[in-house]
Amino acid sequence: MAITLADAKLNTQDDIDLRVIDEFRKSSWLLDNLTFDDVVNPAGGGATLTYGYTRLVSERGAAFRPLGTEYGIEQAKRSRATVDLSVLGGAFEIDRVLSNLGPAATNEVAFQMGQTIKSARAFFSDQVINGTRNTSTATGFEGLSKVLTGSSTEYKTAADWSTPADQPAAHNALDSLDEFLGLLDDTPSALLGNKKTIARIRSLARRAGYYSRTENAFGQTVESYNGIPFIDLGAKAGSADPVIGIDAKTGTTDLYAVRLGLDAFHGVSTVGGGLVRQWLPDFSTAGAVKRGEVELGPVAVALKTTKGAAVWRGIQVNPAATRGE
């Protein structure tokens, strides 16, 4: 069964849970649109949280067959892959004296809950791109950067987007962008980048007349290139560094294209486990300092076909040998 955060909201009766799910959805286009395959059944008392699947590596072709001859032999290639689910989130503590100071919408409990949700969302986006399995702690999952390395959809054509382009250069950049998008097996659901790459795509889309803006369910603006949303994944949790980083020495960065769906790139969750959970501090019992938590998961991501996602490596967005963004 497939589930999204919007579906999870429909199955939730608690008003606090509803607000927490909405905060995850509002603060992350990726989490709001990602479909989770909730098929993992924690066997052995929760000891096994592994999702196994078959990844299509390369497709086969087709051809005419002259009468009296046989077709040439071809096979599509696939490989077996597994991903282990992990929980992520955070905890906080609040003194009961501070818990109700100020309006309910801005008091310390609401503030800490909001900041914990923000960090969990940022951490998930970071893991989707940069994640790697930590074997010593048995946590984490492989992100797109690692999965796509060495694949047929790892695009390495040189591109200099460090300065605004004149018209001929803009057309060349658009040609390369369309060639990159053509690596996927269908129209991508989104382009994922950082502020620098998103700004350049916005500029190119405007020049070509392919720029559009729509509103999502929360009234937020979603920008698109030729109907494909381009999304800034923002900064890593607890940091100002972008999720999709910029090399300080070379000034280069990466751009990702993903097609969301159970046959392409999707999330994985447990059967009936609930995607998002929260625990508010309980000040009704003795004890001056109480704990609250927000948790997403257990979750992971899976790429069912190599052509369901692509990465463009080494786009120049800063002059070489400069620091920062």
Image (spheres, rainbow, N blue to C red):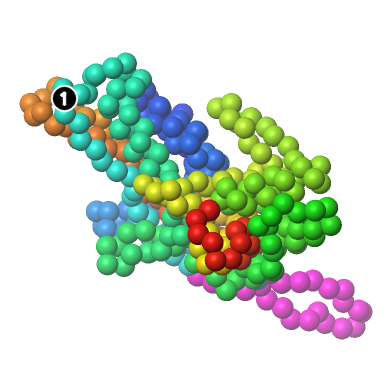
Please, what is the dominant secondary structure of the magenta stretch? loop
Residue at x-position 75% and y-position 49%? 204
Left or right relative to 146: residue 84: left
Disc 1 is placed on an element classified as helix
Query: Is 284 situated left or right of 243 in this image?
Result: left
- Choose between 225 and 280: the one closer to the eye: 225
> Of all residues shown, which one is farthest toward the front?
322
x then y, percent, for residue 136: 27, 67
Residue segment shown in magenta: 59-80
Residue 305 seen in render: no
Q: Badge 1 local density, few (<14 within 10 Å), some, or many (20+)? A: some
Q: Amino acid at mark 1?
A: Arg
Task: Name the spot of residue 112 as percent of width and height, x first.
Answer: 30, 32
Is 65 contained in the magenta span? yes
Residue drawn at x 37%, y 58% as measured from the top left: 140
**Residue identifier under label 1:** 96
Residue at the far bottom: name it: 69
Q: Position of residue 9 (x, y in %)?
A: 45, 31
User: In the image, is residue 226 part of the stretch drawn in magenta?
Assistant: no
* Figure label count: 1
Question: On the image, which quarter does residue 220 sit in?
Answer: top right
Q: Position of residue 325 (x, y in %)?
A: 53, 53
